[in-house]
Image (tube, rainbow, N blue to C red):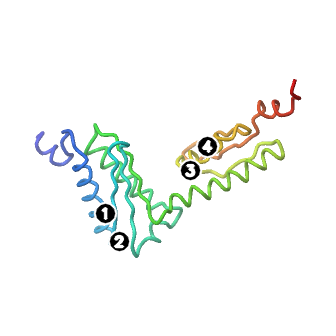
């Protein structure tokens, strides 16, 4: 019985970068074939950082980017789950991208966060960012953490939460006090 289960679920042996590369490539090829995608791929593995970057390109790029990149997210989640299942002892971070989509999406989030930050500072009141998934909220919180004049935190229940951006009272008090 153990032999059958190991064939289905994989063995827990130590795997090398070569095995990860082969596994990732096999899964990507299978996904592209089963989905009838007209796409090619490039896999970059950085063993020192524990990252796998997969770049997809080809005729069906637009399908991957539709609906705020949900297909990219789905492929990335699937790849992560496969690696977690096949190589449970190995910590690997997987990123699936297409034509710089993720960087462009992050830049547009940061632009909007900057605009809302300036409004919060100008009016000295809280402002709210629309409900976002965790990965997008992380980008905004990290960006806003670099500016000591504002603070932010997630508000709401469930997966999609709003972000509250508000002036840091301690910083504004320091600025308003005259130098002694």
Distance from Cα at disc 4 to Cα at disc 1: 33 Å
Crowd band around label 4 with a 10 angstrom C-alpha radius: few (<14), some (14–19), many (20+):
some
Task: Work out whether mark 1 precedes mark 3 in sequence or the reverse, and give the earlier one.
Answer: 1
Q: In this rendered view, identify the residue nearer to me: 20 or 64.
A: 20
SS class, disc 4: helix
**Separation of disc 1 and disc 3 at Cα?**
25 Å
Where residue 31 appears, x then y in whole percent? 31, 63
For image coordinates 27% across by 63% down, the residue present is: 30
Does the CB distance between marks 1 and 3 fall below 8 Å? Answer: no
Q: Quadrant of the N terminus?
A: top left
Distance from the alpha carbon under mark 2 to that under mark 1: 8 Å
Q: Residue 155 carries which label?
A: none
Residue 19 location, x and y as percent? 22, 49
Query: Which labelled disc corresponds to residue 136?
Result: 3
Q: Distance between the residues labelled 3 and 4?
A: 9 Å
Mark 2 → mark 3, Cα distance in angstroms: 27 Å
* Residues tagged 2 and 1 counted as in contact (Cβ below 8 A): yes
119 sits left or right of 101 in the view? right
Residue, disc 1: 31
**Residue that appears at 39% across and 73% down:** 58
Q: What is the quadrant of residue 75 in the picture? A: bottom left
Spot the residue most to the bottom: 59
Earlier-in-chain disc, 3 versus 4: 3
Q: Earlier in the sequence, mark 4 or mark 2?
A: 2
Closer to the chain start, of discs 4 and 1, is: 1
Tag count = 4
Which numbered disc flags the more N-terminal residue, 2 or 3? 2
Residue position for label 2:
37
């Amino acid at each position: 019985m153990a032999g059958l289960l190991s064939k289905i679920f994989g063995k827990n042996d130590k795997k090398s970068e070569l095995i990860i590369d082969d596994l990732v490539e096999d899964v990507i090829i299978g996904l592209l074939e089963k989905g009838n995608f007209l796409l090619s791929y490039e896999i970059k593995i950085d063993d020192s950082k524990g990252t796998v970057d997969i770049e997809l390109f080809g005729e069906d790029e637009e399908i991957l980017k539709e609906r705020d990149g949900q297909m990219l997210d789905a492929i990335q989640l699937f790849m992560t789950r496969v690696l977690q299942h096949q190589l449970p002892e190995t910590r690997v971070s997987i990123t699936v991208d297409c034509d710089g989509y993720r960087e462009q999406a992050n830049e547009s989030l940061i632009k909007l966060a900057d605009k809302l930050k300036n409004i919060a500072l100008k009016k000295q009141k809280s402002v709210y960012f629309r409900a976002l998934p965790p990965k997008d909220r992380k980008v905004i919180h990290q960006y806003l953490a670099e500016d000591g004049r504002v603070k932010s935190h997630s508000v709401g229940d469930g997966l999609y939460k709003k972000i509250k951006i508000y002036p840091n009272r301690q910083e504004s008090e320091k600025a308003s006090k005259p130098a002694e």
